[in-house]
Amino acid sequence: MRRGLTGTLLALVAAISVFAAACSSGSATQVIELVSPAKAAEVIAEQPDGLVVLDIRTPEEFAEARLADAIMVDYYASDFADQLDRLDKDVPYVLYCRTGNRSSDAVKTMKSLGFTEVYEIDGGIVNWYEQGFPVEQ
């Protein structure tokens, strides 16, 4: 009987180890980075498959100026997290807000929702523009 119990315990430990390895390997492939406007411009220029430029400012801010081809999800919308959750989590995102405050919170939500590749522009669109990168109006 002792042998059976030992074998069962070993099998259980092995199963837990395999499960833990499988869970941790998923998070190892997640790329969540705070990047300079120059690095963000580089990522955008490379145009990885399915790249989304995501503006999380208000509709009024978005109408004033935005990065080329950006889509908007209003950070202040009551269903903001739900809107993010409906996006494709397996494509790369370049994320920005006005100065980085909202995007720093949003990136945490995106990480918890399982987005695999998010580049947050340090300093937001203000820093982007101050560094000489173009915006659309």
Image (cartoon, helix red, strand yellow):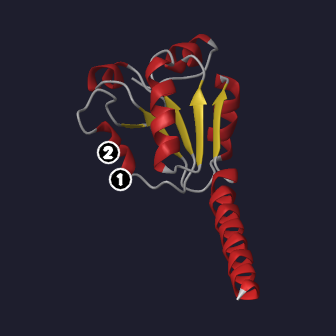
Point out the residue furthest to the left here. Answer: 78
Q: Quadrant of the C terminus?
A: top left
* Label 1: element kind: loop
Residue at 57% across, 48% down: 92
What residue is pinned by disc 1?
A: 86
Q: Amino acid at mark 2?
A: Gln
- Mark 1 is surrounded, within 10 Å at the Cα level, by few (under 14), some (14 to 19) or many (20 or more) other residues, namely few
Dividing the picture into quarters, in which one does residue 60 lie?
top left
Residue at 57% across, 31% down: 120
Q: Quadrant of the N terminus?
A: bottom right
- Find residue 96 and name its label: none
Residue at 62% across, 60% down: 23
What residue is pinned by disc 2?
A: 83
Q: Position of residue 124 (x, y in %)?
A: 52, 20
Q: Amino acid at mark 1?
A: Arg
Q: How many marks?
A: 2
Dividing the picture into quarters, in which one does residue 33 lie?
top right
Residue at 70% across, 30% down: 39
Choose between 109 and 22: the one closer to the eye: 22
Q: Are marks 2 and 1 in contact (CB under 8 Å)?
A: yes
